[in-house]
Structure formats: C-alpha cells, structure tokens
Amino acid sequence: MTIKNSFKQLPNDKGYFGSFGGRYVSETLMPLILEVEKEYDKIKNDENFKKEQNHYMETYVGRPSPLFFAQRITKDLGGPKIYFKRDELNHTGAHKINNCMGQILLAKKMGKKGIIAETGAGQHGVATATVCALFNLPCTIYMGSKDIERQSQNVSRMKMLGANIIPVNSGTGTLKDAMNDALRHWVANVETTYYLIGTVAGPHPYPAMVRDFQSIIGEETRQQIIEHEGKLPDSLIACIGGGSNAMGLFYPFLDDEVQIIAVEASGEGIDSGKHAASVNAGKPGILHGNRTFLLQNGDGQINDAHSISAGLDYPGIGPEHAWLNDIGRAKYVSITDKEAVDAFLTCTRLEGIIPALETAHAIAHIIKIAGDLDKNHLMVLNMS
C-alpha cells in the first residue's frame, strides 16, 4: 500500500467526504447547525479549550487508556500479534465519553441550557448523562423501547445520574427511531437545546467533530505501539455501527501504510435480511441529515436493522466510513451474531476480559483471518 495523498483533508466546507456527508436538515435547524459549525471552528484550535478538555480527559475520564498485549489469544491463534486498545476502561466503561466531554464543553461555550441525546446500547446515554451531571445541565435521552428492555442496567444508570429517559415506540424501537425523535425534539427547542450526537453521523459538522474528539484513541495508540514495538501496526480493526470508535482509532493512521478493517454486524446472515451490514448490503441514500450507505428497499424506504448488539443495530454508517469504503482505503467486512458470541466467550476465557458484544464482532474477524496472517503481523483492536 502506497499513500500518495492525504486522506485527512476532508470534509470540505460543505461537509462532504467525496459524495457522502452534507447537511440535509430542515430550515428550522439550519441556523443552529451553522452556529454549531461556527463555534466548533473557533474552539478546535483554541489552546484554552484544549487545556480544559485535556484536564477533564486526564483527571475525570482517566486517559490515556492502556494498550494491552493479548498474549493468550495471540498464542491460541498462532499469530498475528494482537494488542487491545482498552477504551472500555474509561470512566463510564466505553469510548463514548471522549466525544461527550468535548461536546458538553462546546455546549457550555455556546450558552445552551439543556442537552438532548439518543442512545442504542445505552453507553452514549450514560456518558451524556454523566457529563450533564458533572456540569449541572438538564439531560433528556431518547431510547428505543426495545433497547430499554435489553439494556435495563444502563437505563438505571442514566436515571441515577438524573437523566430523563424518553421511550421511543415507533418503528422497531431501536437506535434509528430514537435518533428520529431526538431530531424532532431539537427542531422544537432550537434556541436553548444542544443535541449531543453520539456517533460520526448526522449533519455536518457532527461527523467530523465527533471524529476529532474520538481521535484521541488513535493518537494514544500511535504513541503506545511505538513504545511497545518500535513501529506502527500492520493493521487496525474495530467494530462499526455508526462508526465513532472505529473512526477514532483509524483517523490518525489514514496517511500511514497501515491496513484498516471495520467489522459490521451481519446478524443472522446477510441473506436472511436480519442484519445491520449497511456497507456490505446497503446502497447510498439520505438519513439523519447526511448522505451515506443505508439499508433500504427498492423505493428508498429504510429497512429495519438487526444485531445481537444494540450498539451496532443501526441501518446506516458514518459518511466518512462510506467514503473510505468507496475509495478502498478501508475494508468493511461483516460477522454474524453466532460468530460474535463465540468470540465473546473466547476472549473472556483466554484473556479474563469480558468484551462488549459490539467489540466481539471485531475479535471474531481476527479469529477468522488469523490463519492467513504471518505470526509477526502486528494488529491493534479497539475495545470500545
């Protein structure tokens, strides 16, 4: 692989990554979206903002997260040499708080009086409720009724943190529907409310902003792997729903000769129709304010997504991922529910680490391809 031009110059000023991305929102929301873009452009290179952000990332979130050599899985597979980026050790137990901390500080700078968010697996909801509690801002979380049932522990955590949970019964009662209702709330409360989006999707500038806040994962990984191995990894791998944890790991390496693999959820199998493989089985369309790969029927209506893991149960993908797939810079594969559960048990048994079912999809793909890789191949997995 030879990298000739930078892959890190997008989006353009209209929010596009190639033909993907953009800003497809109602006229009511457009002034607020432009305000978010203007304020983010101000703070992203502001040293005082960075200093405040770094203070909370170190003393509250607990960064840097460790890079762990998965010795027993590596030995069991006979190679490749596998490292885990342990972002599940952050405060709240996921990567989501990286982005939430950045956005809550931005919302404060903008003088917003309340925060809304959507959540699927509940980790983004927990992280949002956590930073709202820290900064004493009212918090409203939209969550699909199906996800409320299967993520009851996270629902309890959000409530303890003071969040108001709004069940969403429309559609399949999952992440897509929660995001729909959160957007409707935002339209009705544009003056005082900040919408804290949890993934690299939505209208510009959210995909790039969330990516930037999550890139701390890859930036730390880059430094840590050189300290451990004296070189960059041969490959990076992460699970992908909307794609924030994956983009956080990938982005700092886009201009390096490093293979990038993102793992979607193929559920009960792509042929079954019960899956969330929007790249491998979808086509371009517009949803939640951006153009990207989506699961849709011949009339352009969004198909229901399915995954055993609530965090991957989304019928689309972030537009930057759509672009990276389109140009061939990253490889997008898929793993079934059964393969993910088997990998979950393998990781738990061999490493004493109980991974998220989302992350187990990426572990499953490592297991699948290990026999084709040299034992000295150096791979980093993001544990989201």
Image: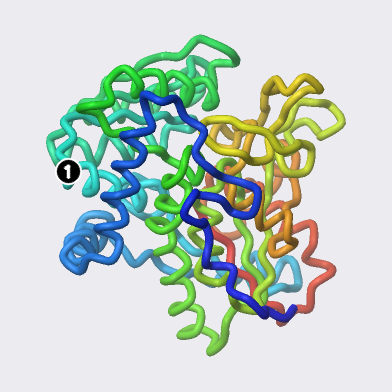
Most extreme residue toward the right is 271
- Image vertical order of residue 151 relative to residue 381, above or below: above
Q: Is residue 257 left or right of residue 159?
A: right
- Image vertical order of residue 233 relative to residue 187, above or below: below
Q: Quadrant of the N terminus?
A: bottom right
Q: Is residue 73 left or right of residue 162?
A: right
Q: Where, by quadrant of the figure, is residue 329 drawn? A: bottom right
Nearest the viewer among 187 and 331 is 187
- Image vertical order of residue 122 relative to residue 40, above or below: above
Nearest the viewer among 337 and 204 is 204
Nearest the viewer among 223 and 105 is 105
Q: Is residue 108 left or right of residue 231?
A: left
Residue drawn at point x = 32 percent, y = 34 percent: 31
Q: How is the image coloured?
A: rainbow
Q: Is residue 165 left or right of residue 4?
A: left
Q: Secondary structure at mark 1?
A: helix
Image position, residue 109 (x, y; %): 17, 47
Q: Which residue is under mark 1? A: 108
- Tell me, yes or no, if residue 107 can be seen here: yes
| Labels in figure, total | 1
Image position, residue 261 (x, y; %): 68, 60
Residue drawn at point x = 71 percent, y = 78 percent: 377
Residue drawn at point x = 74 percent, y = 58 percent: 367
- Tell me, yes or no, if residue 362 can be seen here: no
Image position, residue 142 (x, y; %): 39, 22
Q: Amino acid at mark 1?
A: Lys
Residue drawn at point x = 62 percent, y = 46 percent: 20
Q: Where, by quadrant of the figure, is residue 69 drawn? A: bottom right
Query: Quick one: label 1, few (<14), some, or many (20+) residues within 10 Å?
Result: some
Q: Where, by quadrant of the figure, is residue 181 drawn? A: top left
Most extreme residue toward the bottom is 230
Image position, residue 90 (x, y; %): 35, 54
